[in-house]
Image: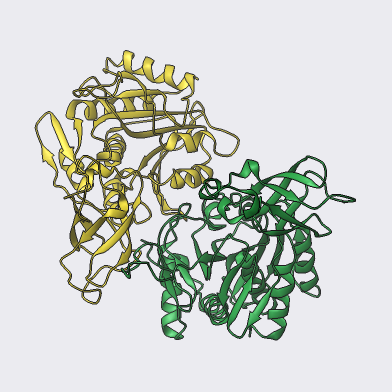
Amino acid sequence: MPRIGIAQLKLLEKLCNATAVSGDEGEVRKIVLEELRGHSGEIRVDTLGNVLVTCPGSGRNRLKVMVTAHMDEIGFMLVADEGEGLFRFEMVGGIDVRQLPGKAVLVGKEHQPGVIGARPIHLTTPEERKQKIPLDTLRIDVGPGESKVNPGDRAVFATRFQRNGQVIIAKALDDRLGVVTLLELVKNAPSNIDLLAAFTVQEEIGARGAKVAAYALNPQLAIAVDATPAHDLPTWDDEENVFYNTKLGLGPAIYVGDSDTLSDPRLVRHLSKTARAAAIPCQVRQPTGGGTDAGTIHKARSGVPSVSVSVPHRYSHTAVSLALLDDWKNTLTLLDTALRHLPAGFLATGRA
Amino acid sequence: MKQLVQKLTETFSPSGYENDIREVIRKEIKPFADEIRVDALGNLVARKGSRSKSGLRIMLAGHMDEIGLMATHVDTNGFIRFTGLGGIRMTMLTGSRVRFMDGTPGVIGTDRLTDMTKAPSLEQCFIDVGASSLKDCPVKVGDVCAFDRPFVDLGNRLIAKSMDDRIGCAVMIEAMRTLKASPHELYFVFTTQEEVGLRGATTSAFGVDPDLGLSLDVTATGDTPKGSRMEVGLGKGPAIKIKDGGMLADPRIVKWMVRTAEKGKIPCQREILEGGTTDARAMQVARAGVPAGCLSVPTRYVHSPSEMVDTADVENSVKLLVALLSASVNL
């Protein structure tokens, strides 16, 4: 049985502390490939850098089910060297500029420390402090003197993984939680289906890796495993929070629809039914914006019925986010149970 | 044909939930198709005829889905917040009636508005289904609904919700019924999820792998008071698309369509639509590329719950489509 124990938490820590900004996923890919050593099915790294793993089942009329988790994370790319250790940079993936000033970063493959500098309170006027600091005035500063970083290098927030009982605090939980989940599914693959696992690249900039992975794997069904923002903080006026109400502690969030995908209703029903039958807590993610690997997968070739399942976490796409261990465990249990109970004739069942 | 339009427009099937309309259309086309299948994204794909020596494999695409709403939150008092499926016009929302897939009717209300000169935002709107608590509300997060408005026959004009694109579906069904012989292998594809980004046409075009693609859809008009500046008007015949917001129709296809209309003495008009696009865009860039065009039915008040078409335009659209498919094509 796949499970989240000490080993999986250790692996999550290692993966969260690694850096893999979209387009530069080598460090995480290396860890994934190490974890897959000894796997009996086929493993290949495709042109874009996706890790594609097949886990053939043994029953008859097996469905080919693609499950993805993306290896990349949001971050930065240095774009110009202005001397004295100062670099202009761009953001990779969706980041709120207001989150940036004063954050420590790690730059390049060797994780050279740096900081996104902003003038300190001593050197600003009260009027200036009311304004946002625009991206083009921010720099990544690695300090004067010798440095190995260059334009084109990526940078990430320098957040170290921490855990306190149920609480996991780290960067890049989106989507290293999914990566460890998918590794567990591969290592304990269900035999009633052919599990086609894709550890994808470039999700944060438009699910580009998933697009080619789906073409190559040519699955009959797909599930994207991801992380979604939890928005369960109290509102200032104590009103009911009606916009984006996915919460921590309520279990995996099942997608009905987002900006890029309308989930296949049969898969939504199957996941909800599985959760009910096995008493696994779960929630419907509030249909709204956002997107996952499913966005490109469901349009691959002649189409792939798809759904996404996410671990809720607070403060997504910032320097640090927070998730609960039980939500993660329940996500793995739900996926594992749902895959094992996927009937061979699933596609013949009435669709919406 | 009016009965068919009524039947199609009175069916509720927003994007991603095309089950009901698919079954209605399947029944209509069954006697005229040689083979019918439903693909992974729910597109209804009907083959008619096979390819003769001078024939092509032609894909015709009309979308079955309509714009709608999806519930995003049910509050403690049973009011439903929602998001749009497709291009929702904010000015059309207040007071609109909706119907959920299980038949539950509702009305759209708004928070107290402080500025009556502005259309409310999506966040200010909610659906009231007559529930008084979360518990007795029959609607759950993720449930979808479509706009509810009866079909009206004005004689020379028809008004209904979801003319976009049930009128295209009706034209295709009528063409299947009246087409006597064709040198082509014809795929009549009733597509899904057009309103959210041509998703059904993207996958069905890959599956059908046509030599030529033609979409059947609605287009806006410029013939209403202080309307947009646009050549197309109601009653002047089907519109032959030259360009829209997402596609340049293949000039050879435009020429073929115009010549066929002239030869058959079928009135037609040239269409340049500045915003919006159709399934033809998805067909055009499928696989290694497909010559594509679009036959549009001029429609007023597109994406409102009361879309209006001209009866003669609809009949002439069928005539033109049948004429196009009856002879061999030399692009």
* Residue B310, image x, y percentages: 19, 28
Judged from this view, the residue extending furthest toward the right is A146
Instruction: Indicate whether B237 appears above or below A21.
Output: above
Q: In percent of the image, x 29 and y 52: which residue is there?
A: B21
Locate residue B316, reporting x and y percent. Answer: 25, 25
In percent of the image, x 68 and y 55: which residue is there? A201
* Quadrant (top left/top right/bottom left/bottom right) for the N terminus of chain B: top left
Chain rendered yellow: B
Nearer-the-camera pick, B177 or B117? B117
Can you tell which quarter of the image residue B125 is in?
Answer: bottom left
Residue A234 is situated, as x and y percent measured from the top left of the image, at 40, 71
Please indicate, yes or no, whether residue A96 appears anywhere in the rendered image.
no
Closest to the observer, B256 or A6:
A6
Is residue A214 shown to the viewer in this render? yes
Q: Is residue A211 above or below residue A225?
A: above
A291 or B157: which is nearer to us? A291
Asked if A87 appears above or below A60 in the picture, the reply is: above
Residue A340 percent location from the top left of the image = 55, 79
What colour-coding does the image apply?
by chain
Colour for chain A in the figure: green
- Which of the 4 image quadrants contains residue A39? bottom right
- As drawn, B146 above or below B162: below
Q: Residue at x 83, y 50 (%)?
A: A149
In the image shown, does B143 or B26 lie closer to the viewer?
Answer: B143
